[in-house]
Amino acid sequence: MDTLSLLGVALGFATLSGINLYLTTLMAGLAVRFNWISLADKYESLAVLADPWIIGISGVLFLLEFFADKIPWIDSSWDAIHTFIRPIGGTLLALAALGEMDPAISVIAGLLSGSTTLLTHATKAGSRLLINLSPEPVSNSIASVGEDGLVLGGLGLMAFAPAVAFFVFLAVVILAIWLSRKMFATIRRGWAAMRERKRAKNMT
């Protein structure tokens, strides 16, 4: 059960970081800093998240993302920039949760966690592109608030039922694989339709 709990926390960090890295880091740091949760010995390496610098920087970056995430096309630009940042952050958080490991296992865990974060990031970024291709601007704000709610709910599950969290996040990853394939096929059709409309407009 301890191993399953560790995997649940690590997989949770990797998954949630792809949605909102800064909120994930900020809330985890605040929870440790103000003793909202008591870290068991196996999670001792996560105590670094309570560092005031980490909390402060993640807080400032979260505020920037909070506003950028609600503006059509700015949110997609922000996601594009974070294509490299989120997987690195998710990997670091997952490895911190797992603690000391054999170097070979650490490399494997890093590759898997980075891939997981990239997958959820791609799913989030793809959903935002679909929203931006639609004529309903308020959807950006609704999606952003919903994503933040998912992160907070996921962190709560990790804190109070980490073993259950493993299976929940595993299901989320599987769902993200299916959704990302569907979304990017739809996005390709949307771009093609936009190019066709632009070409027809230029011909008139």
Image: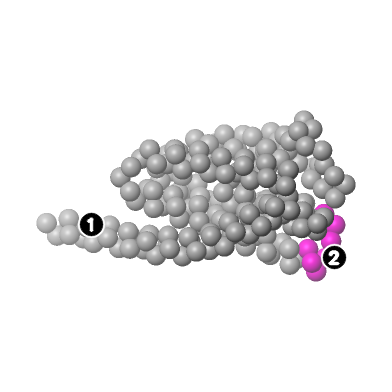
Estimate the x, y position of residue 11 in percent, counting from the top left.
Answer: 68, 56
The residue tagged 1 is 198
Residue at far top of view: 34
Residue at far right of view: 41
Q: CA distance from mark 1 to mark 2?
A: 56 Å
Helix or strand or loop: what does disc 2 sit on?
A: loop
Residue at far bottom of view: 104
Q: Nearer the viewer, residue 190 or 73?
A: 190
Image quarter of the N terminus? bottom right
Q: Nearer the viewer, residue 153 or 123?
A: 153
The residue tagged 2 is 102
Give amino acid for label 1.
Lys
Q: Which residues are magenta?
A: 99-106
Helix or strand or loop: what does disc 1 sit on?
A: helix
At 79% from the left edge and 45% from the top edge, which residue is drawn?
A: 46
In the rendered image of this protein, does residue 109 appear above or below residue 74? below
